Image (tube, rainbow, N blue to C red):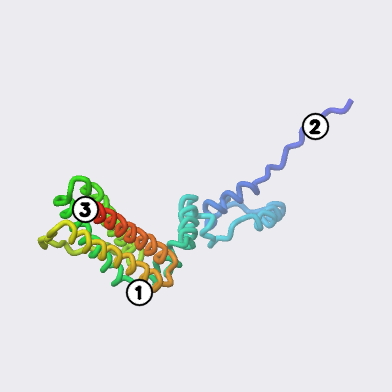
Amino acid sequence: MEQNVHRPEIYDYRQYDRVWQRVAPNLEPYPGMRQSPDSKNSSAEAAPAAAPANSTTMMAPVSQQTSAAQTAQEGQLPGAAQNPCCMGSAAAEMLEVLTGFVEEELGDRRYYLALSRQAPVWARQRLRDIAADEGGHARRLMAVHYLITGECYRPAVSCEHIYIGRWCPALRERYHAEACNGLNYARAAEGTTDPCLAELLNELSADEYRHATELMEMLERALQG
């Protein structure tokens, strides 16, 4: 009857060699020990799997590797481009026009708020709504300014007294102002090659023409009374 003879297993240190190479590649894992021919062969076999001594990728913490990968991805985002397709150098050519529109819109807002305080009761809310629209236009244009330049635009604060005068002449004057504003926005949209800026300017143009229509309706009612 055969007896099972337990032969001592040859311990494979190669997996630990690979770990040691990642942890401390410049240090000798087994100082003071001579390698036998077998161990030399084992080291030779393990060498391709071990990282080179000057490798920084293996030594870098996982968090740093992840951060570096995220930075590389962010650098490829459209918003990180030096000259993006929207609100870039083409839109920058319109900066002076845009800041002029901001000042115009804020002035119109002040006028409509003053006009609403002297208007007939039935017209006051509509005038306040128009004033809110004009303020919204100014905010959108200032956001565009920031997209183009990365800097906040600080509009001038006017303390000038607003004279309204009679109701019907005031509506007539505001009708022409709104219609002209609509035309100016449309012309500005045609004068830029930036597609996003052109779309925004056309939206503002439509709003100004809508205001002109509302003012005409108010004038019709005032003339009938």
Residue 222 numbered tag: 3
Locate residue 138, reporting x and y percent: 28, 59
Q: In this rendering, would 85 be left or right of 108?
A: right
Between disc 3 and disc 1, the foreground one is 3
Earlier residue among tags 1 and 2: 2
Considering every residue shown, the one lying at the far right of the view is: 1
Locate residue 11, reporting x and y percent: 68, 42
Q: In this rendering, would 93 be left or right of 76?
A: left
Earlier residue among tags 3 and 2: 2
Between disc 3 and disc 2, the foreground one is 3
Label 3: how many Cα within 10 Å (few below 14, some 14–19, many 20+): some
Asked if residue 45 is positioned above or below residue 90 in the image, the reply reads above
> Which residue is the site of mark 1?
93
- Amino acid type assigned to the residue bearing label 1 in the image: Glu
Asked if residue 124 is positioned above or below residue 71 in the image, the reply reads above
Secondary structure at badge 2 equals loop
For marks 3 and 2, give the CA distance.
116 Å
- Amino acid type assigned to the residue bearing label 2 in the image: Val
Secondary structure at badge 3 equals helix
The one nearer the camera, 28 or 36, is: 28
At 72% from the left edge and 52% from the top edge, which residue is drawn? 38
Residue 5 numbered tag: 2
For marks 3 and 1, give the CA distance.
43 Å
